[in-house]
Image (spheres, rainbow, N blue to C red):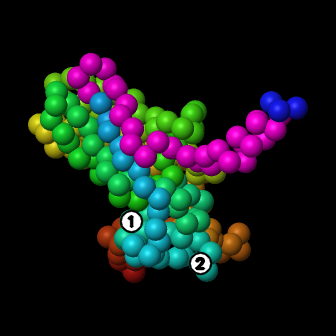
Amino acid sequence: MKLLASAVALLLLGPPAHALDPRQAIALGERIRVVAELHDFNASEHALYYCTEERLCLVDGYPVFGTSGTMPKVGFKQLVAVIDNIVVALDHRGMFNPWSPIDREALQFSLISNDDNGVRIRGEFSDGTAAYVAEWLLVGGVSARVRLDCTGCLPLTPSPSPSARVEPVSDDARTRRTDASAKR
């Protein structure tokens, strides 16, 4: 009975299901690691734009990844790659709730390539409803986020109704030639 009470207390008093270590280092081989520092999202520190009354679309001018239009819970405070002890900042704007789709207590990064063209790193994240992928290319001590997309993201604007009519776009030069030919 004591064991059951202890288990219940641990479940009730333990960290929330989304609890991530606020600072993580993920080794991607011997020379490369990703270091992330996370923090709770504080809405009052950001410019928020809503597409509808309830759907959050932009945070600080960037599309929101990692939520299904709701307020983020966690964001990156800092995200860097360390290659041979050289620290390279990774763009993390718009990236929230960066939980791993496999292990919600760890971040998920992988090394895609490490060759003459540079180092390519991928991060895969999911909060359970909104999964997304980010990739960075690192060359000469600088990085560029080369991919940020999602699966299961809701569209920013509603789809046109089935009764909406879509007209084909024509090439103006062809239209003029056809009109001129018809006049002959």
- Name the residue: 41% across, 59% down: 94
Identify the image quadrant of the C terminus: bottom left
- Name the residue: 62% across, 49% down: 16
Identify the image quadrant of the N terminus: top right
Would residue 16 be counted in the magenta stretch?
A: yes
- Residue 69 in view of the camera: yes
**Along the line of sight, the residue nearer the viewer: 160 or 98:** 98
Which residue in the protein does label 1 denote?
Answer: 62
Image quadrant in which you'd find residue 61: bottom left
* Mark 1 touches mark 2? (CB < 8 Å): no
Disc 1 crowd rating (10 Å Cα; few below 14, some 14-19, many 20+) is some
Q: Secondary structure at mark 2?
A: loop
Image quadrant in which you'd find residue 140: top left
Mark seen at residue 52: 2
Residue 85 lies, with reference to residue 126, above or below; the image says above
Q: How many marks?
A: 2
**Residue 118 image offset from top left, x and y in percent:** 20, 31
Q: Which residues are magenta?
A: 4-32
